[in-house]
Amino acid sequence: MNSFKNCLRRAKKRPGLFAFIALMTLVLTAFEQYNSWTRANASFGFFKNFDYLAFLNDLSNRFLGFFSTPRVAVLTVAAGAVLLFAFCVILGLVFSGFFNQLSSATFDKPRRRGEYRVGISRYTFKLALYFFIVILLTAAVAAAVLYSAIPAIMSVKLFFLGSAGMLLPMILLCAVSLVAAVFSVLFYVLYVTYILPSIIFFKKGGVGVSFRMVNGYCWYLLPRTLLYLVISLGIRAVLWAVHYGLDSRAAAICILIATWMIRTIVNFIYTYFVFDTFSAMKGDMFDSD
């Protein structure tokens, strides 16, 4: 309760924090809802004819085909990396001031003029590098999780094709795959999110500090992070169930507004939680020495 009161008190002192998250959430929510892929596929009917193994096989063939001409592939990857880093620099410019303000708020530093500008000058490059690495790592983790499910999917197919002896192996493989995927995503999200306040606060060694914090306090942080991910997944499941209301323009707008409001609150609370717990863990690890 005290943490929630502190959140409201700090948000009142710096109303731009909530406004920033509201704006970013609106942009991302609108982009998610109004794009051609969502309009064509974002409903549970998408899974009726979806072949998971064929999708992964096609993905692998595309990947191998891309590298069948090494010189073109290397040049394309290099150009893509440059464009991606340029995009990350833009993200760094946008978010550096916000994270500087949020860090100051959670450490109860007095509000000063130019906090956003100071954040841009200090943290733009660090955050650009952070976003660049996180995007690449996220793609790698997503691929690993997708392909790790192949044995479980194969066992399900064999069972439904009439292999009665596959019942127990299917249950075990599905359970192991699900638990491994959940914990992989959970710990990945934990490490990635706690690197943010750490690289803002520490000039050097911030990544190592964030790893120590997550390792030391993981059983306190895991349930909150899991709750955030479950709520986020639940919101998307509801949106898929109603196909984002895209069958009606009025319904789509109402769903967009409702989704935006809910996500803004959830995103603000979790973002504040990350920075607030970071300040508390930093106090336990360093200030008591």
Image (cartoon, rainbow, N blue to C red):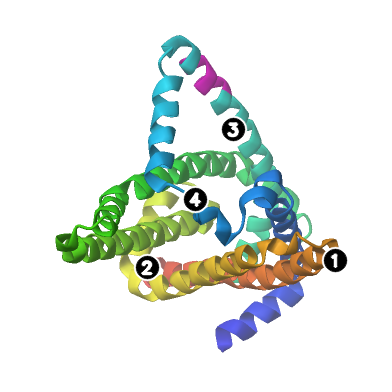
For the point 60% across and 73% down, the residue is 269
Say which of marks 4 and 1 sits in front. 4
Instruction: Measure the alpha-carbon separation of dots 2 and 4.
Output: 52 Å
Q: Secondary structure at mark 2?
A: helix
For the point 80% across and 67% down, the residue is 251
Q: Amino acid at mark 2?
A: Met
Q: Position of residue 283 (x, y in %)?
A: 44, 71
Give the residue at mark 2: 285
* Of callouts 1 and 3, the N-terminal one: 3
Give the residue at mark 3: 84
Instruction: Measure the alpha-carbon separation of dots 4 and 1.
Output: 30 Å
Q: Position of residue 23 (x, y in %)?
A: 76, 59
Disc assigned to residue 223: none
Q: Amino acid at mark 3?
A: Leu
Instruction: Measure the alpha-carbon separation of dots 1 and 3.
Output: 36 Å
Instruction: Measure the alpha-carbon separation of dots 4 and 3.
Output: 33 Å
Q: Is residue 167 magenta?
A: no
* Of callouts 4 and 3, the N-terminal one: 4
Give the residue at mark 1: 250
* Of callouts 1 and 2, the N-terminal one: 1
* Of callouts 2 and 4, the N-terminal one: 4
For the point 36% across and 56% down, the residue is 211
**Drawn side of residue 152 relative to residue 204, left or right:** left
Q: Position of residue 1 (x, y in %)?
A: 56, 89
Q: Amino acid at mark 1?
A: Ala
Say which of marks 1 and 2 sits in front. 1
Magenta stretch: give its range: 74-79
Q: Main secondary structure of the magenta part?
A: helix
Q: Residues within 10 Å of mark 3 (few under 14, many from 20)?
A: some
For the point 61% across and 38% down, the residue is 88
